[in-house]
Image: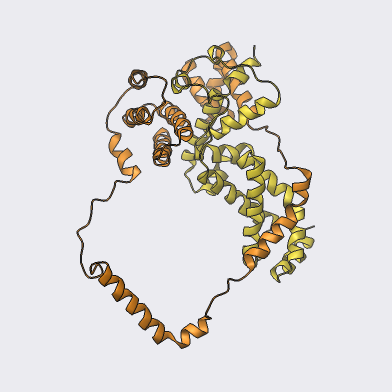
Chain colours: A yellow, B orange
Amino acid sequence: MANDDKILVRKAQDGDKGAFGELVSKYQQRIYDLAWNFTHNVEDAYDLSQEVFIKAFKAIDSFRGNSAFSTWLYQIARNAGIDYTRKRKRRKSTSFGDMGIIDRLSRKSPQTQPIDKVEGAEIGEQIKNAIHQLSRRQKQVFVLRHYEGLNLKEIAETLGLKIGTVKAHHFNAIRRLRKLLSYYVEEEDL
Amino acid sequence: MKCQKVVKFIPEYLEGALASSISQEIEKHLENCDSCRKELHAYQKTIQLSSSLPVEYPSKEKWNNFVPELLSKIEDSSEKPILPFSWQFIWRHAWQFAGVVVSIAIIVAVVFNNSLFVVRQPQNEPKTVEEVISESFVSNISVEQIDKAIQSINYPVTSGRNMIMIYEEINKISVEESPPEATDIANAMAIEIDSSHLNYDSKLVEAIAYIEEYSMSKGE
């Protein structure tokens, strides 16, 4: 498998776009999945994964084969994902969009909030909204920890932050998500 | 260990990031405290929920077109732009080009009131967002005071002016005292600002992001 990659990479480095296309076909899904973890949006994930492969193509001459091609490609994709969260503004929440700022800040029990219950797939939308409401750093840390499976030390190295800073972002992200999703979290306990 | 402290440690406890002595204390507390056990369960559920979103894919047609579309983009981007002159041509005529450049510079300088030769007084540069925010973190206002300040502003918050007033109040927050509250307010504001399409929204969102970074660094 790795040998196949080496041959294809060598050909791609010689300008064989067909060989590069084969590499893309092979890693398309994994790179898309990674992009989706950062975007939680089909269109953005598609565009971001295209961007990742374009970057990889442009930089393929610099790939020396010291690591597996897949490792090199994931690194490009992860950096692109981090960059995406940096550029992207937080989105307006659709679930809480009709609520005023005071409501959102009142820290009342979720049971007292006048929100209709949502079911099934809609919960997924609420989770996406909650993740989009995290700050840039909180989101980066949360995705790298819980979607990409990196430990806190690896995240610190990836983002160029101190481990203590990463811990603070991670814990604040979880606290915030817990608050934003309390309606569903506590609903299951009822 | 008291409930309040246990709840504060729960995220770190779940991550296994606490010293074993503290973890043991928490476990001991959890054995006898229904309320904290419920809170622990809620956090576990939060992480489980938030990290279990299934990947959604584009239509089959779009998915199958991924590689051709990509190769087409690569093809387009690799086409070299057509330049009127080659570098060799420019190099051969370097003196002529230099003469043209100097002539243009002189004309521009004359037209713009000899601006190349006049030393202008430095103008008052607008302060950066960082400067504005860091200067504003001077007072120690409690969370209760912030709430009061927000409540005192006409509700619902619809106008840009109200947004600025709230923003000014947020500036007064001592994030060292209450980082989660400051973050909550900043997040809520960012949503409001994002949806209000105000001219200064990007500046404010940038400022809010800075508040969060600031509060996080103080929260370590």
Which image quadrant for residue A39?
top right
Q: Is residue B78 visible?
A: yes
Q: Position of residue A121 (x, y in %)?
A: 70, 27
Quick one: which residue is furthest to the bottom in this view? B92
Q: Residue B164, position in %: x, y?
A: 35, 31
Residue situated in front as seen by the camera: B10 or A173: A173
Q: Would you place residue A122 above or below residue B135 in this image?
A: above
Say which residue appears at 57% left-offset and 33% top-offset.
A131
Q: For the point 37% across and 78% down, which residue is it?
A: B101
Q: Is residue A183 above or below residue A88?
A: above
B32 in relation to B65, above or below: above
Residue pictured at 53% horizontal, 21% vertical: B25
Which percent across, then down, holds residue B46?
61, 25
Front residue of this view, candidates B72 and A184: B72
Q: Is residue A23 left or right of residue A145?
A: right
Locate the C terminus of chain B by quadrant: top left
Above or below B166: residue A79: below
| Residue A149 appears in view | no
Residue A138 percent coordinates (x, y): 52, 37
Q: Nearer the viewer, residue B43 or B81?
A: B81
The residue depicted at 59 percent of the width and 47 percent of the height is A81
Foreground of the two, B78 or B180? B78
